Image: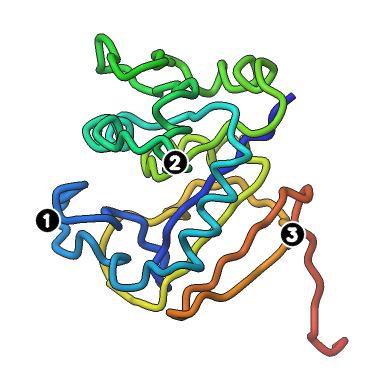
């Protein structure tokens, strides 16, 4: 059975909205689209290639799916490690508003919470979530993410959609590995590790 993994680009203050360009998601008056572009380097590209090499299928929210579907089919280089995966592998789109999806090997998922387990059983390696801010909130609220790959870029924006925006189920995480890129991005991967525990440094009364 596959793991459900979430790979997310984040600012230091947790914003994940429109990292790749202003048109991606200007909702809420967001004016900082494209914030990660100056920091994307060979180290970041290498990591992302490693992530996509493990993919068996993708689970995407509507907005991210539409952004990807407008971009990646136009990348036809057979040696592009990300385009080849996205264009060929199954893409499951969590949406209650889309009537159809036309990008190659795409299908609609109307009730993602109830269908995640079935989707994971169809694959053996990773069912991957990329971007998809709204979908991410649903998955977090129902504790459905097995592993996180968080790329934290050295920038603070103050506004925008955040990954952990509220409503996530409390959970402990285990660090799998970490690395830093040449432009100062910290890449950390975590696996779910049960419930959080607490302690106290307070002196006994």
Q: Secondary structure at mark 1?
A: helix
Disc 1 residue crowd, few under 14, some 14–19, many 20+, Cα 10 Å: few
Q: Give the image location of residue 6, x and y in percent.
A: 54, 44
Q: Secondary structure at mark 2?
A: loop
**Label 1, label 2: how many angstroms apart (C-alpha)?**
37 Å
Quarter of the image that includes the N terminus = top right
Disc 2 residue crowd, few under 14, some 14–19, many 20+, Cα 10 Å: few
Residue visible at 58% across and 22% down in the picture? 116
Residue visible at 25% across and 9% down in the picture? 99
**Label 3, label 2: how many angstroms apart (C-alpha)?**
29 Å
Query: Camera-side residue: 162 or 77?
Result: 77
Reading the chain from its start, which is encountered first: label 1 or label 3?
A: 1
Q: Is residue 127 above or below residue 137?
A: above
Reading the chain from its start, which is encountered first: label 1 or label 2?
A: 1
Residue furthest right in the image: 204
**Dividing the picture into quarters, in which one does residue 126 lie?**
top right
Which residue matches tag 2? 79
Residue 176 numbered tag: 3
Residue furthest top in the image: 99
Which residue matches tag 1? 29
Q: Is residue 151 above or below residue 200?
A: above
Q: Give the image location of residue 71, x and y in percent.
A: 24, 37
Q: Nearer the viewer, mark 1 or mark 3?
A: 3
Q: Is residue 23 above or below residue 99?
A: below
Residue visible at 37% across and 67% down in the picture? 40
**For residue 58, side relative to residue 124 (left or right):** left
Disc 3 residue crowd, few under 14, some 14–19, many 20+, Cα 10 Å: few
Residue 19 numbered tag: none
Reading the chain from its start, which is encountered first: label 3 or label 2?
A: 2
Q: Secondary structure at mark 3?
A: strand
Q: Nearer the viewer, mark 3 or mark 2?
A: 2
Residue visible at 49% across and 38% down in the picture? 129
């Amino acid at each position: 059975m596959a793991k459900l993994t979430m790979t997310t680009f984040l600012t230091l203050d947790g914003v994940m909205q429109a990292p790749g360009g202003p048109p991606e998601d200007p909702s809420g008056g967001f004016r900082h689209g494209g914030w990660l572009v100056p920091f994307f380097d060979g180290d970041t590209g290498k990591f992302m290639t490693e992530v996509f090499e493990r993919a068996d299928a993708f689970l995407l929210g509507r907005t991210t799916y539409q952004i990807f579907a407008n971009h990646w089919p136009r990348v036809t280089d057979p040696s592009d490690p990300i385009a080849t995966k996205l264009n060929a592998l199954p893409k499951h789109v969590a949406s209650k508003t889309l009537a159809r999806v036309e990008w190659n090997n795409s299908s609609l998922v109307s009730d993602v919470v109830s269908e995640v387990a079935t989707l994971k059983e169809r694959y053996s390696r990773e069912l991957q979530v990329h971007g998809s801010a709204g979908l991410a909130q649903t998955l977090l609220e129902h504790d459905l993410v097995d592993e996180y790959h968080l790329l934290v870029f050295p920038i603070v924006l103050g506004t925008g959609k955040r990954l952990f925006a509220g409503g996530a189920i409390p959970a402990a995480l285990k660090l799998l590995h970490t690395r830093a890129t040449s432009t100062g991005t910290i890449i950390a991967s975590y696996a779910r590790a049960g419930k959080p525990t607490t302690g106290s440094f307070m002196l006994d009364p």
